Image (cartoon, rainbow, N blue to C red):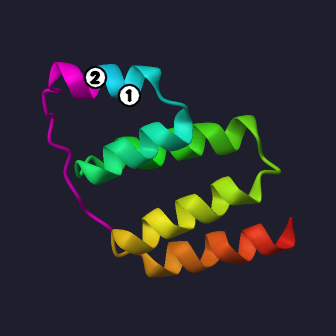
Amino acid sequence: DILAAGGIERVAFQNDLKKKIQAANAVEAASIYAETGIWYDALTSLSSAIAKNPGDNDLVRERAFLLEQIGLSEAARYENQRSLRN
């Protein structure tokens, strides 16, 4: 069995950050979130883009890279294998 735990902390956006995210596409928004340490939203943004474009392996690889950065190596390996199958 695999068990995981975590927490979510709500953070307030600065106006300039909010404007950048609103003007960005999903990949750009994910990058902005990741740069500011907002990992949950970065993953959500990429996952939404993948759901809309399931055959886009670049998006899957981007998500794998992000998962690797946050220490989820096994999930990143799965994503990389998935991108090779498509």
Region rendered in magenta: 1-17
**Image quadrant containing the C terminus:** bottom right
- The residue carrying mark 1 is 21
Q: Identify residue type, mark 1.
A: Ile
Residue drawn at x 55%, y 67% is 64
Residue drawn at x 72%, y 77% is 81
Asked whether, in this view, residue 33 is left or right of residue 52, the answer is left
- Residue 30 spot, x, y in % from top left: 44, 44
Q: Nearer the viewer, residue 25 or 51?
A: 25
Quarter of the image for residue 46 reads top right
User: Could you classify mark 1 by the number of other residues whose Cα lies within 10 Å: few (under 14), some (14-19), or many (20 or more)?
Assistant: some
C-beta proximity under 8 Å, tags 1 and 2: yes
Which secondary structure lies at badge 2? helix
Asked whether, in this view, residue 51 is left or right of residue 47, the answer is right
Q: Is residue 52 visible?
A: yes
Asked whether, in this view, residue 15 is left or right of residue 74, the answer is left
- The residue carrying mark 2 is 18
In magenta stretch: residue 62: no
- Residue 66 spot, x, y in % from top left: 45, 63
Q: CA distance from mark 1 to mark 2?
A: 5 Å
